[in-house]
Amino acid sequence: MVDKDLIIAKASSVKRHLSRIKEKRDTDIETFLKDLDRQESILFNLQMSIQNCIDIAAHIISEEGVGVPGSTNEMFYLLEDNGYISVDITEKMVKAVGFRNFIVHEYGRVELKQVFEVAKKEIEDLEKYLLSIFLKIGI
């Protein structure tokens, strides 16, 4: 059975990290590209918010016994298959996981303009993910 308190705690962490991103993203691209502290804050909070979303998915899959994912991305497909999230949210979460992996593993130089765009336009996808989970499990 899904531990709603755990989901709420993880979701609260996501919201806290997203709030920090929103504080730091409120600038223009030129200022962002010159401000290492702002860049690092946004990168860290993006990483942590996405990781908490992954943790929520892992908990639900484990507790509900809906399958054994072969990868992090597959967790979101399992949630989709079991009615927790829509196809659209699945695609956005898979993209978010890829972005997180890029940050964490530093596969190459992080493209700061892309980070700025993600912070400005795509973090709301994580909020939509949380809302879908909340609706499905009755929070």
Image: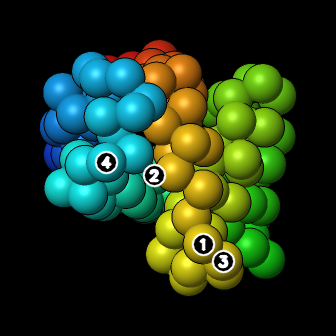
On screen, 21 above or below 53?
Answer: above
Q: Is 32 placed left or right of 115 in the picture?
A: left
Question: Which x, y percent locates residue 29?
Answer: 43, 30
The amino acid type found where label 3 is placed reads: Gly
Count neighbours of disc 3 (C-alpha within 10 A) and say few if under 14, some if 14 to 19, many if 20 or more. few
Foreground mark, 2 or 3? 3
Instruction: List the residue tagged with mark 1.
Output: 109
Mark 4 vs mark 2, foreground winner is: 4
Closer to the camera, 1 or 95?
A: 95
- Residue displayed at 78% across by 37% down: 91
Label number found at residue 50: 2
Residue at image position (74%, 73%) is 71
The answer, for residue 60, to whether it is visible in the render is no
Residue drawn 68% across the image and 60% down it: 98
- The spot of residue 90 in percent (x, y) is 74, 37
Along the polypeptide, which appears first: circle 3 or circle 4?
A: 4
Residue indicated by mark 3 = 108
Query: Closer to the N terminus: mark 4 or mark 1?
Result: 4
Dot 3 and dot 1 residues touching (CB under 8 Å):
yes
Q: What colour-coding does the image apply?
A: rainbow
Q: How far apart are marks 4 and 1 (CA)?
A: 16 Å
| Position of residue 121 in the picture relative to residue 127 (left or right) | right
| Whether label 4 touches label 1, CB < 8 Å | no
Q: Which amino acid does label 1 sit on?
A: Arg
Which secondary structure lies at badge 2? Answer: helix
Of mark 2 and mark 3, the one earlier in the sequence is 2
| Circle 4: residue type | Lys
**On screen, 52 above or below 82?**
below
Residue 20: percent from left, percent from top: 18, 37
Residue under pointer 4:
34
The CA distance from mark 2 to mark 3 is 19 Å
Query: Are there few (<14), some (14-19), or many (20+) residues within 10 Å of tag 1?
Result: few
